[in-house]
Amino acid sequence: MSDLEIRPRPTVGLSRLVGLLVVLMASILGPTSAAAPAPSTAPAPRRASRASRPAPEPARLPFDREASTSIFLVGAAVHVGNGTVIEGGVVELRGARIVAVDGPERAGALPSGAAVIDLAGKRLTPGLVAAASPLGLVEIDMESATVDAERQDGDPIRAGYDAAMAINADSSLLPVNAIEGITSAAVTPRGGLLSGQVAWIDLVAGDHVGIVARPRIAAAGTFGSAVAGSRAATFARLHEVLDDAALLRDRRGSFDKRQTRELSAHRLDLEALAPVLAGEVPLVMRADRASDLLALAELARSSPLRVAVVGGAQAWKVADVLAAAEVAVIVQPSLNLPQSVDQLGARLDDAALLHAAGVRVGITVLDDPHNARNVTQEAGIAVAHGLPHEAALSAITLELARIYGMEQHYGSIEPGKVANLVVWDGDPFELSQWPRQVYLRGQVIPMRSRQTLLRDRYRDLGRFRDRDE
Amino acid sequence: MLLVSIDRPPAGRRARSVGVLLACVVLLLTMAAACGKKTGETTPPEPPPPSRTRPEEPERPRPAPTGPQLLLRGARVMTAAGVVYPHGDVLLRGDRIAAVGSELPVPKGATVVDLRGKVLTPGIIDTHSHIGVYAAPGLSAHADGNETSAAVTAEVWAADAVWPQDPQLERARAGGITTMQILPGSANLIGGRSVVIKPYPGLRSIEDARFVGAPDGLKMACGENPKRVHGDKGGPSTRMGNVAGYRKAFQQAVEYRRNWQRYRDKKARWEAKQLARSRGEASPADEGEDGKGKDEDPPDPPARDDAMETLVGVLDGETLVHMHCYRADEMSLMMDLARSFGFRIRSFHHAVEAYKIADRLAARDVAASVWADWWGFKAEAYDGIRENAALLSAAGGRPIIHSDSAIGIQRLNQEAAKALFAGRRIGLRISDDEALRWITANPAWALGVHGEVGTLEEGKLADLVVWSGDPFSVYSRAEQVYIEGRLVFDEGWGDRAPRSDFEVGLSPADLERDAPPPVFPPGEAAPKAKKDEEDDR
């Protein structure tokens, strides 16, 4: 690691301004992710003034709407997502947001004529998050025309590939998973060393305009032997790319005048890494082997980068190092096989061991967006092998929002957050349980999917003709 | 020993299983009887019939149980035979179940295990695994599941490729699996013979694990996989080509069987003639068609063909067909095709659209081995629904929850639970016992071993799982697993649990222990090891 240092972001002066310009340009140009270079249009004149503003976390997301009336969800055991439970809680929704969360005392003081949903005896949890998932990018895995999860070129550096541009709001996977409690997804491209940009979506089926809550919330990649079949080559390539991204950010003027050395990746892919270099968005890397995890921990320790790991089969072996470097780990607890040599030692209590060591733990279903819904079962399996129950709920809600930097808006039932909520009869991890109602951005959704409709078409087979009869 | 004189099976084959050999002998004897009293003692070498046993209930007389007695007491006993005892007892004697009930008397000399608070079920049975033929780690050297050199490879046997050191086997065992069918993959129209095993520890060959007496199984595949794999190398490249391929193969088998029948008829006549001669009863009419004695030599047998032998086993109803098939239309067509050749498909596998033809599957008594919730990864899986098994169950069919996954096989109980609760969610009345049958009695039937395993009933093999709680809860774990009365897994064993070779020595903890990681369960290897230690001292 010592052979390369990630330069800390300059905090003052022109280079700071240039850096912000790059970030902004990337965000304005948006769909600069295609394999073919996007047309380099002249910058808009307003940019300088916008760049001069500090960029605080916006309090609103594109779908936020004004609303004058509230809906009160009353009486449920509110599992906030941060480990606390409010028995008989009162949750006030307005527009797409939660505006208040109170104890049972509020139930007697609701405005007259208020819209009240009685949830006595129910359990209310935050909407569940599908992390590191190609949800929305894949309809039928084996039909390439329905798959947009990966930029299919030979270059392992695809950091500019922007998942937000490819999400299919009509995907049948969205309602299938939404009615089982998945309300948001960190939609993640795959392939190469740096696969592209992650988008945060809510599973609002059919909302082509509004499905993306925020694009480019993280850069995703795959560690290990992604480059030239060698993990040593992978390290070197990653460092080279990050170094070049920093150079482009800091010396953009020189670059445009061709006064810099040759850069090792496409300009757009390097530009897309600027927020990662600054630690504004995380680098979320698929990795399993302890040596890879240590390399990522060192990267996090020695630079402003925020790093999270997906997979982590051997993470338990280096849990203390990951905890010290504040590297979060997103696991799929059931994966206990030595399926590859990088996964030797995979075990069912990985999540519990990591949690006990102070590592931030997320839980997800890897590589199967069709069944992202089974994250509740995965959480249950983690609990069966030692993870505390509320930690497991947090690992599929708030901890994931934190890992992706979306905790201001998502992940728990707290005032100001998006009203993605799930009503259950009982323990959401139990196989006998399913959501009774799901709220997306403050609204109930129809509890139907392509699957329930197919089911209902074939419940009465007596209607069909059978030539055997 | 008639079989030993036969030229065909190499020595290794002959040892495959006592059960198969016995079955062959039984069949030969049956055949001899059918040939009538003409069969003389000078029987020339004859190729054996295909090795097979009967698919229906193997009504072999069960030996009276002997051996040590173990009384498992006080658990919730879910028999998968229609009875649940809230506080039940199961008495094992040797390798069999001697009694099931509540408050059984304690036999003299029996060891008593207190299982209050636990749940006892039959051992879990998976009809669909590729463990051992696609072993972990997934090295290129371990890809032994699809013989893709041709679209029809009825001559290959999965048993020839199962790596008994696959670490996935012990994980399946830890999940309560006591019987499993290992199948060739689905790249081919006809992929080859399966092998039914019990995941014992300490295997040096998969033959050490073979389920003695289980009928042969044949893997076939519909739809996308064969045409994808073979489309660019000679076909089939369409579903039309797939079905033409099945027809062609079975038509060949029909003709092969006819040729062998002709030969047997000829030989029987020849033998009768020899007998008549030896008794001096020969008549001119027996001296060949031209009366000049041209047929002095016995007739030559036709060439033996392994692939055809397997398919003849199917035609004769003695080899069970397990067919990978997703779509309702294809399953319907395949049932028709099978019927036109006079055989039945025992179980469709994957069958994500079984719910669309639940009535047909039930009427023809064809089982469907399905996942709880896999769907959409390919076009033919696009219509999968959670209620698939439950709707088939409600229609009177035989649903089975299978894994096709070395992860899923570790908790088929949870997969069954998801399918069960999906059914209850839409108001179907499905008992716990019925859902348990999806992973015990029904797969036992599909594998033709339901006379021996699949339920907790007196006389059956003592394959059982002790669960920490309700097997349909996500939090329950298999705490103990018995196969044929032998404790093969105990959660409490920890590092003392038997392990296959592959993972030995790959962790520092192994290098620090004085003895190698065990091959056998703790209690079993102990006596000898103790003695050795004493000698050392």
Image: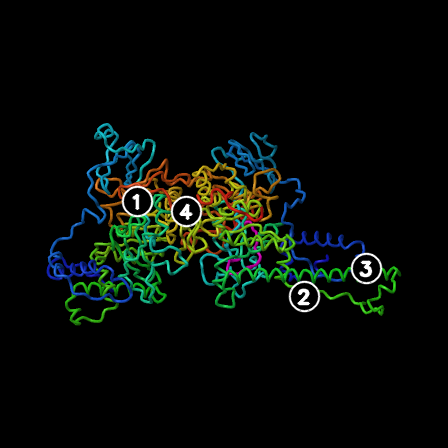
Q: Residues within 10 Å of mark 1 (few under 14, many from 20)?
A: many
**Of circles 3 and 4, which is in front?**
4
In the structure shown, which secondary structural element does the residue marked by tag 3 occupy?
helix
Residue A157, image quadrant? bottom left
Residues at marks 4 and 2, CA–CA distance in whole angstroms? 52 Å
Residue A451 circle label: 4
Disc nearer the start of the sequence (3/2): 3
Q: Is residue B191 magenta?
A: yes
Whether the residues at callouts 3 and 4 have beta carbons within 8 Å, the answer is no
Could you confirm whether marks 3 and 4 are on the same chain?
no
Mark 1 and mark 4 lie on one chain; the one further toward the N terminus is 1
Q: Overall secondary structure of the magenta stretch? A: loop
Q: Tag 2, which chain?
A: B
Q: Which residue is mark 1?
A: A397
How is the model colour-coded? Answer: rainbow
Amino acid type of disc 3?
A: Ala
Query: Horizontal placement of B357 versus A29: left or right?
Result: right
Question: Distance between the Cα atoms at labels 1 and 4?
Answer: 25 Å
| B122 or A415: nearer the viewer | A415
From this viewpoint, which residue is outermost toward the top? A108
Q: Which residues are magenta?
A: B184-201
Looking at the picture, tell me which residue is in the foreground, B189 or A258: B189
